[in-house]
């Protein structure tokens, strides 16, 4: 039901998804009038009577709309009737309902939203958290590192993906108190081989592809994501303006068309649509609200891959293995070089 | 002395600066061998015996190198022998020495680093703080808003530049506890007409040019700045790769040359070089360490403009006017809609 375009886009993407994946089955959850028209031998309908609005406060979504399509879909996951839920709806509501219905895994205090961004190595960097948690402590950042490692290793097959801690400099003595402490925790985890901790990274390292995973709190992650979307839009906008300026430029635009098309594809956030809500006892994926058919299809694909690759079991196993580390050990952040060397 | 390239670059920029500004005078501060060769009727030399290294810890710069070129240059400002100091050296050391020697203005707890970023309106957005303060409370963010307003109004002539508070959403109920509280403080300041507070803004608003000024803590500002530099580099790199791919692309590159050159100029951070250290009892400007002659020249120009436009007096006047607001009033952050409406 969700997203800016509603069932018109999501149902079209669902049909294509079923065509592309002959072994996949879909459970369509929505108000009767919306799902009734969709018929496929590998799709079944589950009717919900309410819809969470994009502007609904979390409290309304959670407490008043108990038969919302979002909640019913997540309940399907909880009941084992579906392997994963995908929604393009209200992020805050989705997170709150998922957390309430599914609960977090043992050792995880707060779920995180993880997404992929393209990097200069031609691959993608997984960044978390992207907005679920605006105030994080060091232990939460360590949990995010474990969750991100489980996600990337299950999706890429690399058992030991590298983790960077987003900071204002690479040096251990730099950063806020929370980051300094998180850096110590991550270093301890690396020594115990539960994490492949590269060290602190800076904002540009996300796009350099310095590490497979970049960990940050949801406030910083959200601002960095939107700032980069902003500068990329500015550049594309500028190129369009320049190419429409004079005759020579128009010729250039024509000849440059394939290059600009390739750039647009490279930067196309639709290709990276489908953020994982990690740390829950069930798989939930969030599509951009503005997703079109292509973008929503990518979100469905990501949920499908996660289910096929047993993401949930892998996350659980990795967390269980890292349990001694996640038990909030007592450490102090380094404040001078002596403490630094001691860590 | 400072920066990655040292006097070779800075002295060349100094000569050009003197040529461009017939009423300007320069005080060159450095070790004797470095400054001795530079002779100009409007330049004088002040010899320092030490140099702060790019890797020197703040403590070393502050306590052990008391005759560093950085410290001697800032002392010139303190003594009234120079209107502004410009350095391409170690940022942390510059900030610490400037703060120690010059002290902060009344009502200001911590100085901020403010820089300009290009926006889609063809102008520039002033962003602060960019790394001086990694842990900020709401009152500090309010001080940054006042400092930024003084900077922009003195440089642009617009008496009432708009201020946005960087957040994960525009809504007042979104964000960390510090941001929610800062939002209340800024709203109170707007009511008293000391600030033109637009409201909360998101990362992409920096590049949209939604507001003249964007306020954030130094951690978020630094990450956002570096992330955008990263994505811009990735795009330029990608365009270069694509244009060198085949014959058709090489033709496109040739025809597109003026467009790409214009893009490069638009994104050229050298044109925005020269960040202001605000909130001190004297003018200090920080150049990128990697600055070339052109970039360092821009930093000199910005210091010159600030001195000519009496930036310091304007900052002082604006802070004095806003003094009742800066006195850390007692407010509580809104946690629900009722509190929100009450604010």
Image: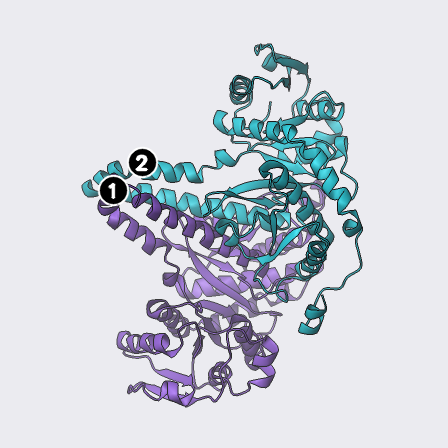
Chain colours: A cyan, B purple
Q: Position of residue A37 (x, y in %)?
A: 57, 10
Same chain for labels 2 and 1? Say yes or no.
no
Q: Position of residue A57 (x, y in %)?
A: 67, 35
Residue B202 can be seen, yes or no: no
Label ID, residue B252 = 1
Residue A112 can be seen, yes or no: yes
Verify CB contact (< 8 Å) between mark 2 and mark 1: yes
Residue A33 sits in quarter:
top right
**Judging from the image, what secondary structure is the residue with disc 2 in?**
helix
Who's the residue at 49% across and 49% down the image? A207
In this view, A194 is above or below A174: above
Q: CA distance from mark 2 to mark 1?
A: 9 Å
Label ID, residue A258 = 2
Disc 2 is attached to a residue of which chain?
Answer: A
- Camera-side residue of B199 and A332: A332
* Relative side of A227 to B19, left or right: right
* Relative side of B271 to A196, left or right: left
In this view, B157 is above or below A49: below
**Judging from the image, what secondary structure is the residue with disc 1 in?**
helix
């Amino acid at each position: 039901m969700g997203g800016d375009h509603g069932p018109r886009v999501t149902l079209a993407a669902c049909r294509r998804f079923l065509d592309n994946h002959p072994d996949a089955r879909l459970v369509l959850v929505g108000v009767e009038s919306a799902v009734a028209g969709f018929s496929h031998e590998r799709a079944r309908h589950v009717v919900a009577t309410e819809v969470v609005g994009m502007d609904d406060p979390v409290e309304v979504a959670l407490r008043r709309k108990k038969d919302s399509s979002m909640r019913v879909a997540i309940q399907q996951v909880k009941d084992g009737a579906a392997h994963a839920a995908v929604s393009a709806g209200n992020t805050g509501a989705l997170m709150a309902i998922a957390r309430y219905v599914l609960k977090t895994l043992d050792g995880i205090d707060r779920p995180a939203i993880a997404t992929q961004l393209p990097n200069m190595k031609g691959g993608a960097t997984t960044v978390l958290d992207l907005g679920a948690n605006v105030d994080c402590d060091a232990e939460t950042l360590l949990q995010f590192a474990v969750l991100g490692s489980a996600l990337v290793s299950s999706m890429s097959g690399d058992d030991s993906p590298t983790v960077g801690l987003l900071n204002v400099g690479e040096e251990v003595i730099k950063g806020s108190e929370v980051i300094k402490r998180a850096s110590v925790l991550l270093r301890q985890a690396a020594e115990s081989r539960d994490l492949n901790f590269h060290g602190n990274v800076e904002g540009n390292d996300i796009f350099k592809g310095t590490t497979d995973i970049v960990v940050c709190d949801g406030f910083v992650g959200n601002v960095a994501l939107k700032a980069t979307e902003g500068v990329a839009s500015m550049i594309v906008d500028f190129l369009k303006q320049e190419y429409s300026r004079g005759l020579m430029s128009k010729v250039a635009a024509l000849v440059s068309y394939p290059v600009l098309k390739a750039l647009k594809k490279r930067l196309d956030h639709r290709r990276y649509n489908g953020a994982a809500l990690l740390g829950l006892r069930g798989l939930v994926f969030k599509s951009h609200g503005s997703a079109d058919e292509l973008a929503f299809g990518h979100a469905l694909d990501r949920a499908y891959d996660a289910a096929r690759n047993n993401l949930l079991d892998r996350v659980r196993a990795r967390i269980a293995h890292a349990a001694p580390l996640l038990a909030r050990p007592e450490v102090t952040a380094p404040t001078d070089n002596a403490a630094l060397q001691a860590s």
